[in-house]
Image (cartoon, rainbow, N blue to C red):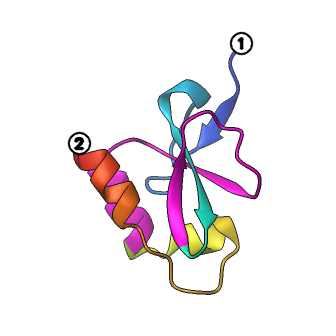
Amino acid sequence: MEPVRTCIGCRMRAERSSLLRVVARDSEVVVDETASLPGRGAWLHPTNVCCKRAVKRRALGRALRVNSVLNTQTLENRLNG
């Protein structure tokens, strides 16, 4: 049985393999492809809808426990292809 995580964008539970792990690095949100980067991580569906919801709800900062403004450009570029 695979571990289950909650998407911070839509708040739906899904298997770990279907979600992206993101971490904060120098005030920037970075996709953690191998799920092994140090630091607090958050899980997100790999869709623009969930990313935009997470940004709008300010869920990224809360989930990653960062008080500063986070740059999500790298994450958005990754999701757009």
Classify mark 1: helix, strand or loop.
Answer: loop
Residue shown at 44% from the left, 64% from the top: 54
**Residue furthest front as drawn:** 26
**Residue furthest left as drawn:** 80
Amino acid of disc 1: Met
**Of 31 and 6, which appears nearest the observer?**
31
Residue shown at 66% from the left, 66% from the top: 64
Residue shown at 29% from the left, 54% from the top: 77
Quarter of the image for residue 56 reads bottom left
Residue placed under numbered mark 1 in the picture = 1
Q: Position of residue 36 (x, y in %)?
A: 71, 39
Q: Nearer the viewer, mark 1 or mark 2?
A: 2
The mark nearer the N terminus, 1 or 2, is 1
Residue 81: mark: 2
Quarter of the image for residue 13 reads top right
- The magenta region covers 28-55
Q: Is residue 7 visible?
A: no
